[in-house]
Image (spheres, rainbow, N blue to C red):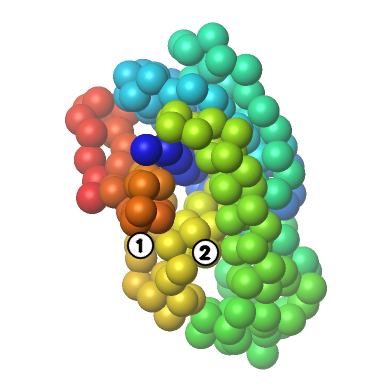
Amino acid sequence: MTRLLLWRHGNTDWNAVDRVQGQTDTALNDLGREQALAAAPLLAAMRPDAIVASDLQRARDTADTLAALTGLPVGADPRLRERHYGLFQGLTSPEIAERYPAEYARWRSGDQSPGCEVESLDDMGKRMAEALQAAADANPGGTVVIATHGGAARQGMGHLLGWPTSILHTVGPLQNCHWTELRLEAGRGWRLRAHNVGVNPATTIPAGI
């Protein structure tokens, strides 16, 4: 059995104000670092065999907190980046709605390719699934922690599981520093075992489904 833990990065100042990050290289804030430090011991207890991260700073810095506990190196894979949001990047939702109302409406309705140079969900899912499968192939029978981004994790998960986008839209988003667990089982393929698992740094009580 091969296990993947898709771990969303910690909070950033852009998360805090609902500013679209996409592939903009933002850093963790104090809360994000606290979240990563709280989650890392739980992931370390799962005895990961490898850590792979998006090459964006917020994901890499999140992964480094786990690497400090396990002694494992952190591999970088740009395919694990968040969706490229084109002209939306750097803007808040109200700003996007004002500047690009038609494209904003398509985006919010779930259109896979809303325009404004936004990467399609299908393209994002394919590159994510390729990166996830590559990590699994490199560690057969092992546990790999993938430090990535919320939207990217959900779409990559969906491609591995063979779920259509209509189903993925019913799956709640990952909170900062929470993770999704996927297992590759012999004769059965990829299975979803848990979603949105994590810890509240103020309580250190695990939560999730």
Q: In the picture provided, is 107 more to the left or to the right than 158?
A: right
SS at badge 1: loop
Residue at point 32% right, 19% down?
Answer: 45
Q: Residue furthest bottom?
A: 102
Residue type, label 1: Gly
Q: Residue furthest front?
A: 187
Residue at point 35% right, 72% down?
Answer: 170
In this rendering, the answer to whether 66 lies above or below 135 is above
Mark 1 and mark 2 lie on one chain; the one further toward the N terminus is: 2
Binning the other alpha carbons within 10 Å of mark 2 as few (below 14), some (14 to 19) or many (20 upward) gives many
Q: CA distance from mark 1 to mark 2?
A: 16 Å
In the foreground, 56 or 48: 48
Which numbered dot is residue 133? none
Binning the other alpha carbons within 10 Å of mark 1 as few (below 14), some (14 to 19) or many (20 upward) gives few
Q: Position of residue 202 (x, y in %)?
A: 27, 27
Residue type, label 2: His
Residue 128 in view here: yes
Q: Nearer the viewer, mark 1 or mark 2?
A: 2
Q: In the picture provided, is 47 more to the left or to the right than 156?
A: left
Q: Position of residue 39 (x, y in %)?
A: 38, 27
Q: Quadrant of residue 44?
A: top left
SS at badge 2: helix
In this rendering, the answer to whether 159 lies above or below 207 is below
Q: Quadrant of residue 84?
A: bottom right
Residue at point 46% right, 11% down?
Answer: 69
In this rendering, the answer to whether 144 lies above or below 83 is above
Which numbered dot is residue 159? 2
In the foreground, 95 or 69: 69
- Which residue bears the numbered disc 1? 172
Residue 11 in view here: no
Residue at point 40% right, 54% down?
Answer: 190
